Image (cartoon, rainbow, N blue to C red):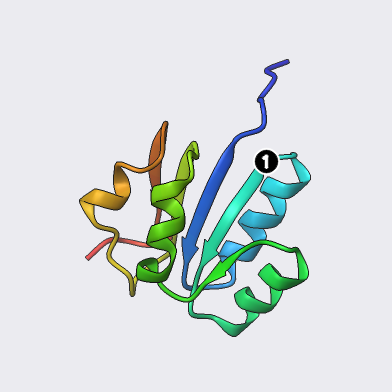
Amino acid sequence: MLKIFPFTCYLVGEDNLIIQCAEILLTRSHFILGIVSKLAAVKEWAYKNQIPYFSSLKSAKVNMEESKFDYLFSITDDSQSISGELIRYPQKLAINYHDSLLP
């Protein structure tokens, strides 16, 4: 059986799928250092789970710069463009998941 060691990450997203992904990560003992979304439901979920919440990438940028983290997950995020600078912050990968055809 493949053993996956806990990792650290930030999540960015604009629909409820981000909550489902975050819950999976937490049940598998990974660490979410912050969640970026404009959705009220995501904000409420983040506060309930004691995860730092940011309403925009701009507001999360300082935290991302100062923390060492493994992955940046962009989950069905259509409204916020992730800059090349932000893509370089994770120590392992920046991963974009889009659940439909791209334009």
Q: Secondary structure at mark 1?
A: loop
Residue situated in front as seen by the camera: 50 or 17: 50
Please tell me which residue lies in front, 25 or 17: 25
Quadrant where the C terminus is found in the figure: bottom left
User: Going 67% across and 32% down the picture, which residue do you hit?
Assistant: 6
The answer to which image quadrant residue 40 occupies is bottom right
Residue located farthest toward the top when viewing the structure as drawn: 1
Q: Depth check: 9 or 24 in front?
A: 9
Which quarter of the figure has residue 56? bottom left
Q: Left or right: 48 with respect to 80?
A: right
- Residue 19: percent from left, percent from top: 64, 64
Task: Give the answer, above or below, for where 30 lies relative to 6.
Answer: below
Q: Position of residue 88 (x, y in %)?
A: 30, 41
Q: Is residue 15 above or below residue 82?
A: below
Q: Which quadrant is home to the N terminus?
A: top right
Other-residue count near label 1 (Cα within 10 Å), few / some / many at <14 / 14–19 / ≥20? some
In the figure, 31 relative to 36: above or below? above
Asked if 101 appears above or below 31 in the picture, the reply is below
Measuring from the top left, give residue 12's x and y in whole percent: 46, 61
- Image point 46% across, 56% down: which residue? 63
Label 1: which residue?
30
45 horizontally vs 99: left or right: right
Q: Residue furthest bottom?
A: 40
At x 73%, y 48%, the residue is: 26
What residue appears at the point 68 percent right and 17 percent down from the top-left corner? 2
Q: Which amino acid type is shown beneath numbered disc 1? A: His
The tally of labels here is: 1
